[in-house]
Amino acid sequence: MTIATTTARTAAGAVDAVKAYGGGDTAVRALDGLSAVVPAGCW
């Protein structure tokens, strides 16, 4: 099996992103370890 690969420019990206609301014992993590890439020209 052959897998084609392409190289695209990246417009935006995040690696292991975390977004927490509050703090201490009541903190809520809306994102926990999110990784994403948005290729250039996608929007």
Image (cartoon, rainbow, N blue to C red):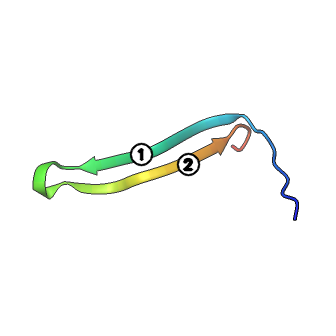
Kindly identify the residue that appears in the image at 13 percent across and 57 percent down: 26
Q: Residues within 10 Å of mark 2 (few under 14, many from 20)?
A: few
Which residue position is annotated with label 2?
36
Label 1: element kind? strand
Kindly identify the residue that appears in the image at 63 percent across and 44 percent down: 38
Residue type at numbered disc 1: Ala
Q: Tags 1 and 2 in contact by the CB under 8 Å rule?
A: yes
The residue positioned farthest toward the left in the image shown:
25
Q: Quick check: 7 above or below 27?
A: above
Q: Residues within 10 Å of mark 1 (few under 14, many from 20)?
A: few
Kindly identify the residue that appears in the image at 28 percent across and 49 percent down: 20
The residue positioned farthest toward the bottom in the image shown:
1
Label 2: element kind? strand
Which residue position is annotated with label 1?
17
Residue type at numbered disc 2: Ala
Q: Which part of the image, by quadrant, shows the C terminus?
A: top right
Q: Quick check: 2 above or below 24?
A: below
The answer to whether residue 37 is left or right of residue 3 is: left
Precedes in sequence: disc 1 or disc 2: 1
Q: Quick check: 24 above or below 7?
A: below
Q: Which part of the image, by quadrant, shows the N terminus?
A: bottom right
- Tell me where residue 34 appears, x and y as whole percent: 46, 52
